[in-house]
Amino acid sequence: MAIDVATAADFYAGRQGVVTARLVRERLSALWPDLSGKSLLGLGYAAPYLRLWRENAERCVALTPAQIGASRWPAGKPCLSCTAEEDALPFPDLVFDRILLIHGLEAAENARGLLREVWRVLKDDGLLLVVAPNRRSPWAYVESTPFGHGQPYSPRQLGGLLAASLFRVERRESALYLPPLNRKLMLRTAPFWERAGRRLAPQFAGLTICEAVKDCYAAVPARKLPARRLVLSEAA
């Protein structure tokens, strides 16, 4: 069962969610340190992570797939948030320089349909960053966190799915070696767990991360889509 927006928001508002988001943001910022002048789409439940780039990106959009619910961006922040069907994104072709897919792929009802739409709206020289639960990690099976819902992926499975969707993986990363326990002592020692895990047991990372580019530039066949739900939540 996929996570819903309300449950994800409650998790990130708590102490475990605050620490988790900080650890994951460290890895994402190392991959994409600066997006000045870039157009960015956060797809899934991306609000806790878009804060890395929302001040310098030229355009920042957060889209939550309809099956997990609508989310609102905090008032006064330079971001547009909306909700739409995952296989009918309400954007023209080739519009985004960067797309962050987090809390989205594992929740997808049609993962290939979602990635096909990502391929369509990503510029030919754009980059896609996919963050998904690692099926070998306990994070993928603890339902008290957003990562314990939906379909987890091994790094190989994620790479295969991206290849089948006309993406080529350029870089692989991992994050979240901290055990998924909401204990004060565990959370306080989070930096130790991250350092030790990366060195001693990289295969058990909570998250697998892939940065990918388009693997071919063939035209996407035009197709007429039925009317879909689109809910604009907020525009600053």
Image (spheres, rainbow, N blue to C red):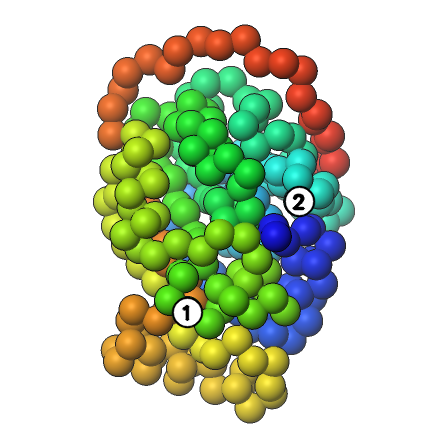
Quadrant housing the C terminus: top right
Residue 12, by quadrant, is bottom right
Q: Secondary structure at mark 2?
A: helix
Counting every numbered tag in the picture gives: 2
Q: Is residue 177 above or below residue 164?
A: below
Is residue 33 visible from the viewing direction of this image? Answer: no
- Please give the name of the residue rendered at 62% of the width and 30% of the height, measured from the top-left corner: 85
Q: Is residue 199 above or below residue 110?
A: below
Residue 87 - label? none
How many angstroms separate mark 1 from mark 2 (CA)? 23 Å
State left or right for residue 111 relative to residue 60.
left
Q: Are marks 1 and 2 in contact (CB under 8 Å)?
A: no
The residue that mark 1 highlights is 137
Residue 208, by quadrant, is bottom left
Q: Residue 211: percent from the left, percent from the top?
A: 32, 46
Between residues 28 and 133, which one lies in front from this camera angle?
A: 133
- Please give the name of the residue rendered at 70% of the width and 26% of the height, measured from the top-left corner: 230
Between residues 151 and 174, which one lies in front from this camera angle?
A: 151
Residue 68 - label? 2
Is residue 32 visible from the viewing direction of this image? Answer: yes
User: Among all residues in the image, which is located at the extreme bottom?
Assistant: 185
Q: Residue 62: percent from the left, percent from the top?
A: 60, 40
State left or right for residue 193 relative to residue 16.
left
Q: Amino acid at mark 1?
A: Ser
Q: Residues within 10 Å of mark 1 (few under 14, many from 20)?
A: many
